[in-house]
């Protein structure tokens, strides 16, 4: 198994992570500028959201491509556990 997998969602994940980097840099500048805690909390929330969305997209991508390819193609009923797992990942 190789570590160089490129999936359709990877550009979207990269975009989300770059957005998080931008928000995080903004938070550092805001702290240095003495901005309010409310402003800082809002920007930190944006960083968390961007990272959480990237993680969720990556997990769903893995389920859709890697995990499903590891098991034989089945009926829609056989996909139910995978679909349920994708739904529960929103609580990670």
Image: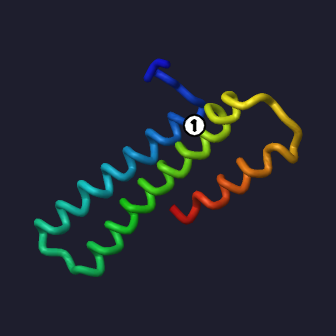
Left or right: 55, with 78 as reference point: left
Q: Position of residue 15 (x, y in %)?
A: 45, 42
Q: Out of 38 and 81, give the one closest to the viewer.
A: 81
Percent position of residue 71, x then y? 72, 31
Residue found at the far top of this picture: 2
Residue 35 appears left or right of 71: left
Quadrant in the picture for residue 46: bottom left
Q: Residue at x 36, y 60 (%)?
A: 47
Residue 88 sits above or below residue 57 on the image = below
**Which residue matches tag 1?**
9
Relative height, residue 4 to residue 17 (above, below): above
> Residue 25 or 52: which is nearer the viewer?
52
As drawn, 85 above or below 7: below
* Residue 63 picture location, percent across and down: 63, 41
Describe the element under mark 1 as helix, strand or loop. Answer: loop
Residue in the image at 46% along x and 18% along y: 2
Crowding at label 1, few (<14), some or many (≥20) Cα neighbours within 10 Å? Answer: some
Q: Residue at x 25, y 59 (%)?
A: 26
- For the point 84% across and 35% down, the residue is 74
Residue 89, located in which quarter of the rendered image? bottom right
Model colouring: rainbow
């Amino acid at each position: 198994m190789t570590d160089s997998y490129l999936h359709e969602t990877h550009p979207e994940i990269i975009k989300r992570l770059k957005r998080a980097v931008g928000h995080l840099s903004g938070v550092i500048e805001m702290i240095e500028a003495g901005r309010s805690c409310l402003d800082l909390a809002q920007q930190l929330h944006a960083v968390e959201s961007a990272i959480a969305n990237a993680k969720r997209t990556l997990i769903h991508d893995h389920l859709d491509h890697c995990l499903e390819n590891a098991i034989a193609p089945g009926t829609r009923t056989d996909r139910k556990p995978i679909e349920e797992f994708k739904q529960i990942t929103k609580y990670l």
